[in-house]
Amino acid sequence: MFIIAQLSDLHVRSPGKLAYDDVDTNAMFHNAIDAVLSLDPRPDCVVVSGDLTDCGLEEEYEVVAAGLARLPMPVFVIPGNHDRREQLISSLRPRHRYLPPDGFINFVVDDFPLRLVFLDSVETGSIHGTFCAARQQWLRDALAAGRGKPTVVVIHHPPFLVGADGMDDLRLLGAEALDAIIKDHPEIERVLCGHYHRSITAHYAGTVGYVIPSTAHQVALDLRPGRSNRFIMEPPGFALHVWRPNMGISSHLVPVGDHGSPFEIATDQDHPGTDRDNGLPALLVRAGAVVNEAAAKLVAMQTTPLRTERKDHLDIVTEADLASEAIVVAGLKALTPDAGILAEESGASPGDNGARWIIDPLDGTINYARGLPWFSVTVAYEVGGETKLGLINAPDIGMTARYLAGEGATIDGVPACVSTTRSLSDAVISVILTSHFSPEEVRRTTRVIELLGRVVRGVRIVVSGALETTMVASGRLDGFVSLKADIVSHAAAMPMVWAGGGQVTTLTGRPCRNDDLDKIASNGLIHEELLALLRQALQ
């Protein structure tokens, strides 16, 4: 896959000046650069299709040069009618060595799987563009040298009509010659333009012509005959052009600005076409909202005085555990009335459909009660002994994890991926040693910790099984050891490790079931070495 980010019509002004006495184009230029830098994956290159500056002044190009220097990928620019060709070359060529030393700014970039041909369409002193005989011959020669390689042409002035008289009056004049050249080269997959400050797509000369909006102000759409252009502060934007050898190019408009965070698509069960027997993606989203509500409740209660009761041995339960569980149980029952419930505090209640929710409303209660951040709300939806979806929200450290059978797991929006550590001597391992362990279980665990401490790079005792297992899935930990793991803390997290390429087994090496007590998770690369050490410690 090859990705081009196309920016255009920056209209950068001298520092402290506004375009048209009203538009802070410099700030909007840097906003666009920020937006490009935030992309994942990042583009392979950036092209700027003209009007880098508003007046073509040296101090304006200094602002442009500094902004473009923030981009780590290759950047290629051509002039527009607001640019001054000689000043652009003088100011930018020290960093942009592809620019010719003088004359028309025509050049070819042939370093990528897609060939990029840049055309200078500027007619000095005019708003419209031209395509003179010299530029025509240069383009013929440049395209012939490509020998049919997939190609994109970048030019400031659109050579095609768009149906808006105010824009069409400013197009490339003498475009018939360009039309004929483009038609002779079917390898040209796009003709990319700027100038019109709008997103416009047109069928052109056997290919696709694409105009992108400005990174600042836009031209108001007016299709009435004879109407002139006016500016409007519609959202700024740029384009991403994605090329694959078996697909060609697809072009995507990217608005610049804060438009909120992405959220999951949850089709209503009554929507036509919804498969009522396959609603796990929608259930994941709705259950996620329930878990988030419970996590927010825990955050709100952590700084208040908490009633605490002793539970098993030295373990405790707080009123926050109970409040979180009440939210989760009620919310999940409303979503799936026929499913059973297995919850940390209230225990089991059977269902009618072979499915059940496994809930730890506050995994890491002792951490939570002491104001420590290592706790989470953990929920798994199990069908036939297999976790179909899992949700973990650790609000104090800002970690959220999701698992969906058949689709995999994400942690903080990133696909689960275990570490690449290949030796225990380089590994960081977390071990559970908690208050509900019997004296014998404490002795067994301390033997494990003692031996690990001699061999591994680091041993951690966090005592939040869901959190620690998820950290293995994300590559932050290399392994996790629990010799007495309850089902509620791990049912959501174990499949995330598998989805990330790791292993979760018992001490015997058998893949874990939800109800197994001993759970050993790792990146897989150190698993056999870790199991051998554990068996040595426990023999």
Image: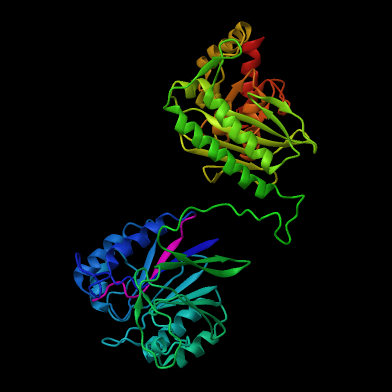
Q: Position of residue 32 (x, y in %)?
A: 37, 62
Q: Position of residue 366 (x, y in %)?
A: 51, 20
Asked whether residue 263 appears in the rendered view, the answer is yes
State the residue at coordinates (58%, 52%).
264
State the residue at coordinates (36%, 84%).
229
Task: Classify 273 as above or below 441.
Answer: below
Asked whether residue 422 appears in the rendered view, the answer is no
Report the front residue among 372 and 405: 372
Task: Classify 380 as above or below 448.
Answer: below
Left or right: residue 306 versus residue 433 is left
Is residue 46 on the magenta stretch? yes
Task: Classify 7 as above or below 42.
Answer: below
Q: Which region of the structure is painted magenta?
A: 41-55
Report the front residue among 288 and 531: 288
State the residue at coordinates (59%, 10%).
313
Report the front residue among 440 and 241: 440
State the residue at coordinates (62%, 9%).
438
Left or right: residue 4 versus residue 79 is right
Q: Quadrant of residue 6?
A: bottom left
Report the front residue among 160 and 435: 435
Q: Quadrant of residue 404?
A: top right
Tell me the chief SS of the magenta region. Answer: loop
Q: Quadrant of residue 422?
A: top right
Q: Position of residue 436 (x, y in %)?
A: 59, 14
